[in-house]
Image: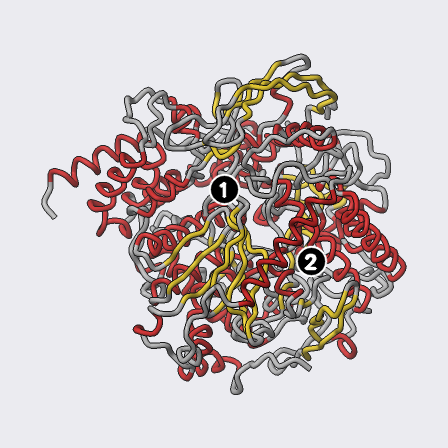
Amino acid sequence: MSHNSMNLKLNVWRQKNAATAGAFKTYEVNDISDEMSFLEMLDVLNEKLIVTGDEPIAFDHDCREGICGMCSLYIDGKPHGPWQANTTCQLHMRAFKDGDTITIEPWRANAFPIVKDLTVDRGAFDRIIQAGGYVSVNTGNAVDGNSLPIKKDDADASFAAAMCIGCGACVAACKNSSAMLFLSAKVSHLALLPQGDPERKSRVTNMVAQMDKEGFGACTNTGACEAACPKEISIANIARLNKEYLRSGLTAE
Amino acid sequence: MLNSKIPAGKLEDKWVDYKGHCKLVNPANKRKMEVIVVGTGLAGASAAASLGEMGYKVKAFCFQDSPRRAHSIAAQGGINAAKNYQNDGDSVFRLFYDTIKGGDYRSREGNVHRLAEVSGSIIDQCVAQGVPFAREYGGLLSNRRFGGTQVQRTFYAAGQTGQQLLIGAYPALERQVALGNVTMYARHEMQDIVKIDGKAKGIIARNLITGELEKHFGYAVLLCTGGYGNVFYLSTNAMGSNVTAAWKAHKQGAYFANPCFTQIHPTCIPVSGDHQSKLTLMSESLRNDGRIWVPKNLDEKRKANEIPEQERDYFLERRYPAFGNLVPRDVASRAAKERCDAGYGVGTSKQAVYLDYAAAIERYGKIEVSKQGLTNVSIDEITAMGKEVVKEKYGNLFNMYAKITGENPYEVPMRIYPAVHYTMGGLWVDYELQTNIPGLYALGEANFSDHGANRLGASALMQGLADGYFVIPYTLGNNLADEIYNAPIPTSHPAFEEAEKVVAERIQKLKNINGTQSVESFHKRLGKIIWNECGMSRSEAGLKKAIADVQALKKEFWSDVRIPGEINEYNPELDKANRVADFIELGELMCVDALNRNESCGGHFREEYQTPDGEALRDDENYMYVAAWETTGEHQWQLHKEALNYEVIKPSQRNYK
């Protein structure tokens, strides 16, 4: 294993809160090991800021293993940074080299207001789920798990859509700030399973309406969302969403 | 002696009888009753959703920006259930037995049997919610085997079972939010319990965005706030996972049980340097197919692939031929530590062992060849086919390893080392999941009750969902039925005012210290003390030293910590300071508990108490009890014991050989 260390310049977006204007601020970090994760590099900077009496940079993060969806960051113009199929917390400093300048911004979307610095409010996603991202089954109603065989291919495709971690990279990557990939992942997850069938029409209609209400933009099929998605959620889900939406509008209840 | 309120009667009838006779709250009264749920992982989300469905007015709190982020989401391998779908001899009794034995005979029979009984319903419920579990080509559910068992009873969704289960429970919760039955308070952290006339009647919560304190009344308070593994600083827990809610309850009089029972998971990615902020688990499911080994030669310089078969020591297969690589976690961890301490470790730090997939890749490749009826297949083609099979089973885990280490685990063995993963200890609860404070409950990892001194793999998800979906809906009603005569208490009540004042003063005190060292630096130092002296092995001298060190650290923290920013704003450093202050106090209690328990059992290994071949040596005569600690002052605790009565199972020395 290599243990190269590097010196870097960081352009970081600082903003006290949603009501105050923000600006880029430049920092230098030295002796960064290439074995560190990107967030550990920010930890090093924050430790330095705290000890010197400055305010540390606020950023969202929790599991640091690429599954909770809490971390974000727009790194050098890309959501979650330069690696494919990756979250910021799993990005490691091997991706950079000595002397690099790295620009770090928050997710930019009207539907994701800034909380502070690099932290944004993604409550809109929860409200989209509230509009129908579930099967309406109360605890205790279930029949035996094996009483309903599901084709392996359907189960696998449903799982591939259900892998969405709700991080919002798709919205951040989209020039229109559309949430179609996020929404389509949830609609597909349930549309591919017999359990989701009874509510499929109302689900898609209500969830799309909520998405529009939250202020997300329209989808123009540029595919930036798919390219940025850490879990490689396929844009084919958006096609499925459109089909489901059309179907719910054209056929009677 | 503490009374666990286990119902009388035969083991298999206890829960059935309880459900048949417990008191109910009628729907009109449920509508009037507010219940507080703190934490929205599997236990909290399932409890909040189920109670909302039943008609209670639920207030749910989480410190993350959404309930979907709770750390249950990171569970990888699977969830156990006694379905016997594989026709391999599984049953409720066998799951119960494996769990008791796996816990090294330090858990309660009644609770564990109930857990095994409801395990099947959990799978049914999750399937009904649309959780996409792995399936076979016939369309039915797939299973795999986990440690400490000889049957395949683990249900899974690739390597992200926790995520998929939470994506069943979280929308169920959001559905209740949409229906108005649950009010969700995200980015809120509980700061204290409010007690009135000895009963828990609410909480003080802090809005983490504005810093404001809020008072919330509830007829009951459910703590579903997970474990305290982050006391070690480095663990597989999320950065925000903390003990604060449970610790505040403890300071208000709730007993903290078996705090020294912590689980060190054998297969984690090793520490790479001082910058490390967390450790990443590689699922136990990898031990199904991977083989664990170290070189037989001291000072081995060759790369793993260059070491011939006869010069490798498959130490788990050697020591435990019956269970092989799938011995329980505590056993596997200690065996790896033993080899590394003896100088056989691998990698630059020498604190790692190999987890090797070469044999599995070849085996799966050959199976594919015979499935497809191919002949004259080269070894390269077999390997390629085998890699595809392994990729389907474990692809996301292999990718994760590659990203973190920069090595390709399909080509070279993974390097792994044990790391803190789970805490079996927690708030003491009775059969109804109620703490010794009436109205205060603890569910999931936050309580202590089901896993004894060591949890088996794929049982945490099972317990969290059992508590939330299938236990608390009954036991809460049994207690709230008597509360219908009491009117809700307004939060202008002096007890709420006083509790809020105490919380505000503590935060102000922390902020006013204005010292020179960061919160993080204190947390790291605490972690090192606890890992070294109260980690994989413990000794009397080490624990005594650790207690003194933690006490000194506490003093230093409260006189020299530096918290930047303001109180009344979004201030993650302040949130962290609040949590670390509690971790420091807990760390001391863990050492006190470990020092008291003069035996080795499960994850608690006292160097003084071991068999000649290095296995844990229990002392059932003197320590077959739950150690429940009551706080009586600074650095002072009183021990209360709950005797563990084994009526069905006869405790013996665990044997996986």
Q: Is residue B26 above or below residue B44?
A: below
Q: Residue furthest left?
A: A252
Q: Residue furthest top?
A: A99
Residue sitting at 28 percent across and 52 percent down? A195
Residue sitting at 59 percent across and 19 percent down? A25
Q: How far is the residue under mark 1 from the one under mark 2?
A: 29 Å
Q: In the depicted view, which residue is nearer to us: B294 or B552?
A: B552
**Residue B424, percent across and down?**
64, 61
Left or right relative to B419: residue B537: right
Left or right relative to A76: residue A113: left
Residue sitting at 32 percent across and 43 percent down? A154
Callout 1: chain? B
> Label 2 amino acid?
Thr
Disc 2 is placed on an element classified as: strand
**Residue B106, percent across and down?**
67, 71
The residue mark sitting in front, 1 or 2, is 2
Q: Do callouts 1 and 2 point to residues on the same chain?
A: yes
Residue B471 visible in the displayed image: no
Left or right relative to A45: residue B144: left
**Residue B249, percent across and down?**
61, 64
Q: In the depicted view, which residue is nearer to us: B422 or A47?
A: A47
Residue A234 visible in the displayed image: yes
The residue wearing badge 2 is B262
Q: Quadrant of residue B512?
A: top right
Q: Is residue A252 above or below residue B538?
A: above
Disc 1 is placed on an element classified as: helix
Q: Residues within 10 Å of mark 2 (few under 14, many from 20)?
A: many
The residue wearing badge 1 is B393
